[in-house]
Amino acid sequence: MPHQIVDYSGSDPYYVCTVPLTIFLDWKLPTSFIDRLLKGEIIIEKSGDYSKYDEFLFKSWLRDLSEDINPEATLYEMRARLLRLASRVSSDKQSERIQIQPGEISKVEEIALFIAQNYMNPLKSADIGKKIGLHPDYANVLFKKAFDTTINDYVIQERIMHAQRKLITTHKKIADIAFECGFSSINRFNAAFRKINKCTPRDFKKEYQ
């Protein structure tokens, strides 16, 4: 789920680049970097020295893609930029790259897309595997290779991410948010939320809304 702006100040330029999941996974970035991004973490350069360089790159990408000028070169530059970012913020060794094969990436994307579209409903890995046309065990193996987590844990993470967004951007009751995000009880929601965020939903709402 892309980040969204909930507040801003000043007039600094803001650029957004959305990369399809299949391409992103095929870039085989360090696993911890991928894990942090897919869990919704905002990763920022330790130094601001690259800001002018990044602005030049984004403008170049926008111009080239809008004019359909060698999009393959643009993708190479995007991947190189993320590799440099990952090397500065990740503790992974160079050999610790995602091991999923190109032919498997489309199935992983199908699983992630199905979860994103159905996280608010009861979901089990067996149901997801059946929907995608894979044995549940094999679906879990592929998914763990790509995201370093199980399908069931990813479903919970997806629900919590949407709950965080609703806590910040709406005035709905916490109980209503829990059920809208697919949790069958308040206790399960609170336990999952505290495990991931190290705080209660109420405390999260007070701090970030």
Image (cartoon, rainbow, N blue to C red):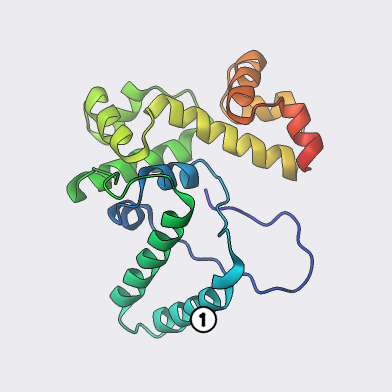
Q: Which of 54 and 9 is in front in this view?
A: 54
Q: In this view, does 53 lie above or below 174?
A: below
Camera sees residue 171: no
Q: Which of 2 and 79 is in front in this view?
A: 79
Q: Which of 31 and 95 is in front in this view?
A: 95
Q: Estimate the x, y position of residue 17 in percent, counting from the top left.
A: 49, 65
Camera sees residue 99: yes
Q: In this view, does 24 lie to the left or right of 6?
A: left
Instruction: Give the residue drawn at x 57%, y 71%.
Output: 49
Instruction: Give the residue drawn at x 47%, y 34%.
Output: 118
Which residue does the numbered mark 1 point to in the structure image? Answer: 56
Quick one: SS at disc 1?
Answer: helix
Q: Is residue 138 left or right of residue 76?
A: left
Q: In this view, does 104 lie to the left or right of 164?
A: left
Q: Estimate the x, y position of residue 69 in percent, counting from the top left.
A: 34, 84
Q: Is residue 171 left or right of residue 141?
A: right
Say few, some or many: other residues with alpha carbon within 10 Å of mark 1 (under 14 / 14 to 19 / 20 or more). Answer: few
Quarter of the image with the C terminus in it: top right
Q: Nearer the viewer, residue 152 or 127?
A: 152
Q: In this view, does 16 lie above or below 139?
A: below
How many numbered circles are shown?
1
Instruction: Give the residue drawn at x 47%, y 77%.
Output: 57
Q: Estimate the x, y position of residue 109 in percent, counting from the top left.
A: 33, 45
Q: Estimate the x, y position of residue 111 in percent, counting from the top left.
A: 34, 38
Instruction: Give the residue drawn at x 77%, y 29%.
Output: 203
Looking at the rendered structure, the kind of residue marked 1 is Phe
